């Protein structure tokens, strides 16, 4: 018998590879859930999907206010996220490449908590001189708090990786504001170049933190309260939105039996798993299918789970119910 109101939204971490369209035994559960589902459109891009799921409203036209959202989670203080205008100032690695300066991001940057705290202390005074409050809450998630929107147009960190930073430096409606922020970035780079922390890293043969990347600016969005009864994720944007909405949140569960017991209880829940780094798309699809889709397929078929929605980053949502799974034909083409 179907549990009235048991509803799970499941995020696929990326775009599904073409192999999922075939009824391959390695991804059979995922294929079945996509092939028999009612298909509709959703936002494009993982963070946009999350904002849509939480009914998060933002006045920012030039990008999502990621900094305020993740700050709510990293500080465990949603009230602080609503006070002021937030900007991510994440530690990154820049590398010269001919006449270009490439942004390598920070995926390969092994930065300890103590090192991040020491670098943060060094940068605190510099940013304070510009009227900004700096905090390194996590080794790779650093923040600036401003009193108001400076009117910047910024490029997201992942969008700028492997590109020449000269094409993605802060832009503004007036030349003075843009020049001020570029000057600040230069001062940060000089401060980091002279840092004892980076000198020690170089001596050990490790990559230095030689810049920060400004992105994700905005004030905390208005979020629908208690949109989900429970959120499971390893990713700070979904956890930050859960924190702002007042939902219970935790890391992705490992015990399938215990997790399925919670999923099949009344209420709407969200699961946003991550893939291991460097996994290829077919391996990710197989892992997702076997780990999550196989037990969920059984739960929907039996009626224990009333509704299962699978969201992808390419703008599609697959809704499964016990009724849709009774179809004998494929709709996933």
Image: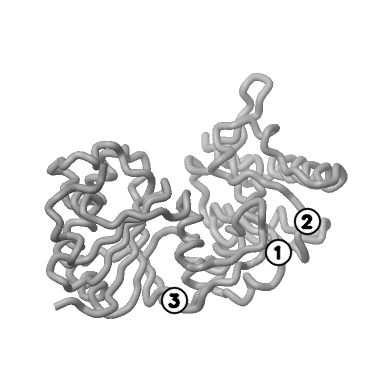
- Mark 1: secondary structure: strand
CA gap, disc 3 and disc 2: 31 Å
* Nearer to the camera, 32 or 177: 32
**Residue at the (34%, 49%) spot, across then down:** 275
The disc placed on residue 85 is 1
CA gap, disc 1 and disc 3: 23 Å
Q: Would you say the residues marked 2 and 1 are in contact, meaning their CB atoms lie under 8 Å apart?
A: yes
In this rendering, the count of numbered labels is: 3
The disc placed on residue 247 is 3
Q: Earlier in the sequence, mark 2 or mark 1?
A: 1
CA gap, disc 2 and disc 1: 9 Å
* Residue 135 picture quarter: bottom right
The disc placed on residue 75 is none
* Coloration of the structure image: one colour
- Mark 3: secondary structure: loop
* Residue 58 picture quarter: bottom right
Q: Earlier in the sequence, mark 1 or mark 3?
A: 1
> Could you tell whether 261 is left or right of 199 in the image?
left
Task: Give coordinates of residue 83: x percent, y percent.
Answer: 69, 72
Q: Would you say the residues marked 3 and 2 are in contact, meaning their CB atoms lie under 8 Å apart?
A: no
> Could you tell whether 182 is left or right of 240 in the image?
right
* Residue 292 picture quarter: bottom left
Binning the other alpha carbons within 10 Å of mark 3 as few (below 14), some (14 to 19) or many (20 upward) gives: some
Q: Quadrant of the N terminus?
A: bottom left
Q: Which residue is mark 2?
A: 150
> Could you tell whether 278 is left or right of 264 in the image?
right
**Residue at the (33%, 47%) spot, across then down:** 276
**Residue at the (36%, 39%) spot, across then down:** 278
């Amino acid at each position: 018998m179907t549990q009235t109101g048991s509803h799970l939204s499941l995020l696929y971490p990326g775009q599904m590879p073409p192999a999922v369209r075939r009824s391959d035994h390695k991804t059979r559960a995922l294929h079945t859930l996509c092939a028999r589902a009612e298909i509709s459109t959703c936002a494009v891009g993982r963070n946009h999907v999350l904002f849509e799921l939480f009914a998060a409203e933002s006045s920012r036209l030039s990008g999502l206010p990621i900094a305020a959202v993740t700050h709510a989670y990293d500080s465990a203080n949603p009230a602080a996220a609503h006070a002021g205008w937030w900007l991510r100032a994440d530690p990154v690695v820049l590398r010269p490449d001919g006449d270009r300066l490439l942004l390598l991001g920070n995926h390969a940057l092994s930065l300890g908590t103590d090192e991040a705290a020491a670098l943060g202390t060094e940068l605190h005074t510099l940013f304070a001189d510009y009227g900004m409050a700096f905090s390194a809450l996590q080794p790779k998630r650093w923040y600036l708090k401003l009193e108001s929107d400076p009117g910047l147009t910024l490029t997201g960190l992942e969008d700028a990786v492997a590109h020449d930073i000269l094409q993605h430096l802060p832009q503004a409606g007036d030349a003075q504001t843009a020049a001020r922020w570029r000057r600040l970035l230069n001062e940060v780079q000089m401060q980091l170049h002279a840092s004892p922390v980076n000198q020690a890293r170089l001596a050990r043969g490790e990559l230095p933190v030689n810049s920060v990347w400004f992105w994700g600016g905005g004030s905390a969005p208005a979020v629908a309260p208690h949109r989900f009864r429970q959120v499971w994720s390893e990713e700070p944007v979904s956890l930050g939105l859960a924190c702002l909405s007042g939902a219970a949140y935790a890391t992705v569960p490992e015990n399938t039996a215990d997790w399925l017991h919670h999923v099949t209880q009344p209420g709407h829940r969200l699961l946003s798993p991550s893939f291991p780094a460097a996994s290829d798309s077919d391996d990710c699809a197989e892992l997702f299918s076997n780990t999550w889709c196989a037990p969920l397929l059984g739960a929907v078929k039996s009626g224990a789970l009333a509704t299962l929605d699978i969201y992808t980053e390419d703008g599609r949502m697959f809704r499964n119910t016990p009724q849709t799974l009774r179809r004998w034909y494929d709709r996933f083409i």
